[in-house]
Amino acid sequence: MSKLTICGGGNAAHVLITLAAHAGWEVDVFAPLADEADRLEASLASRGGIIARRGNQTIVGGARCISADPAEVIPGSELVLLALPAFAHGPTLQAIADHFDSGVTIGALPARGGFDYQAYTVLKAKKISARIFGLQTLPWACRIINYGQEVEILGTKAEVDLAAYPSSKATALIEQLSPLLGLTLTPVESFLTLTLANTGQLIHPGIMYGLGCDKEDVIFARDEIPLFYQGVDQPTADLLQVMSDEVQAIAKELSVQLPSFEPQQVISLHNWLLRSYSADIADSSTLRRAFNTNRAYVGLQLPTRPAGSNTFVIDYKARYLSEDVPFGLVVLRGLAELVGVTTPTIDTVIIWAQKHLEQEYLINGELTGSNLVDTRAPQVYGIRQVSQLVEAS
Ligand code: NAD
């Protein structure tokens, strides 16, 4: 039996554990955060497996070994899957890299922006030869119901893009991963394509800005918290459209400066929604309606934190900004700077978000902020010219 290790103990890891075990893999889990490994182990020991619920369907699967010690779970892994927010990719790769077998494949679900730069840097420093891959998004909307026991799959995307390095390995990887994940995977040319095609970096900070700008002092009762996707109003939809157009402009200019780059693989936000959620969207006529009428997004609210007894304020440090700005929009902004395309709307969102995150990325229109080093902008990895993107992709 082939063995894989899942890194992480959150929503995505719960789904992956059940699907991989169900698909016949021997599953180990690396979960070093807090007491997650102990909690997962105790729960699985008493119940035998995690139940994933998708509508009326249930899938059950468990893990062989769960540990916070990489030496116990990484050796012998054919696949290592990072089911983590992007800010955990770096520390996790550093923790596990010394334990890789040669020929291992490491993948991030989802990759977010610039995963390849970070992964190469760690692997090169440790002289490890490995294949890497990334998915453009997490294939599922999913939430843990009971930790280590039950997870709900709210929606599954119809199709998800995959980039691999070396890119020649993409087809074989897709053959291996499609039955495991239970969905259609589409190869894209390179990680550069995936970084530009990361729609989470537009949707999450864009809606946070559109619905949350100037609402810092608003206190909501639980039933007044605005809906996130269903609450997209016309100005927010217009903002998202302009952000998407700015990405299209970067992709177009890249194809001029890098003739091997295929811009058509970077699809617009509206087209991405229609492709990913074809069966879930009731009215696809406009970008706004595609968000408002998507069954997979029903009921999801703006992230909040408690403000008092049963009252809440918007949480501007939530992952929709703390992950999707440094590992999304700032990476995109770095690419825009390399090709010389201006992105005024993306800049506005970055400048607004960095204030809330208490970070500095963009100063006077330049990526010179003191926290740029904590992002995955290409400039952080020494990429200063478009030609260097070819070597890196
Ligand atoms: P989650 O919050 O449920 O889990 C995060 C897990 O990451 C933690 O439980 C922990 O195991 C690990 N982790 C976090 N910080 C760490 C650190 N510093 N070191 C080591 N491990 C750490 O997140 P999730 O919902 O599973 O999401 C995973 C990724 O998928 C994120 O990038 C998220 O944006 C993306 N995503 C999730 C959904 C969804 O519906 N859950 C949908 C689309 C995209």
Image (tube, rainbow, N blue to C red):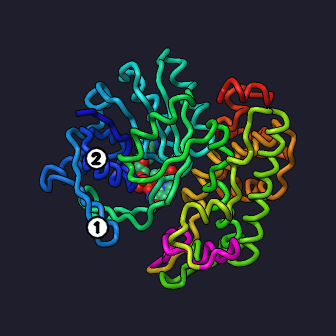
Q: Which residue lies furthest to the top in this view?
A: 127
Question: Is residue 374 visible from the viewing direction of this image?
Answer: no
Residue at mark 1 = 57
Q: Distance between the residues labelled 2 and 1?
A: 15 Å
For disc 2, the neighbor class at 10 Å (few under 14, some 14 to 19, many from 20) is some
Residue 179 vs 200, above or below: the answer is above
Residue 130 vs 21, above or below: the answer is above
Q: Which residue lies furthest to the left in this view?
A: 46
Magenta residues, start to end: 283-309
Relative image position of residue 51 (x, y in whole percent)? 25, 60
Relative image position of residue 311 (x, y in whole percent)? 50, 79
Q: Which of 171 and 128 is in front in this view?
A: 171
Relative image position of residue 213 (x, y in whole percent)? 71, 70
Q: What residue type is labelled 2?
A: Ala
Quarter of the image where the N terminus is located: top left
Q: Is residue 144 left or right of residue 65?
A: right
In the image, what residue occupies the spot 14% across and 56% down? 47
Q: Which of 234 and 182 is in front in this view?
A: 182
Question: At numbered mark 2, what does the secondary structure look like: helix, strand or loop?
Answer: loop
Determine which quarter of the picture holds residue 144.
bottom left
* Badge 2 or badge 1: first in the primary sequence: 2
Determine which quarter of the picture holds residue 15.
bottom left
**Residue 92 forms part of the magenta stretch:** no
Question: At numbered mark 1, what does the secondary structure look like: helix, strand or loop?
Answer: strand
Residue at mark 2 = 23
Determine which quarter of the picture holds residue 242.
bottom right
Q: In this view, does 205 lie to the left or right of 62?
A: right
Q: Which amino acid does label 1 sit on?
A: Gln
Quarter of the image where the C terminus is located: top right
In the image, what residue occupies the spot 63% across and 59% down? 272
Relative image position of residue 69 (x, y in whole percent)? 29, 32
Q: Find out if the beta carbon at label 2 lies less than 8 Å from the nearest ligand 1 atom.
A: no
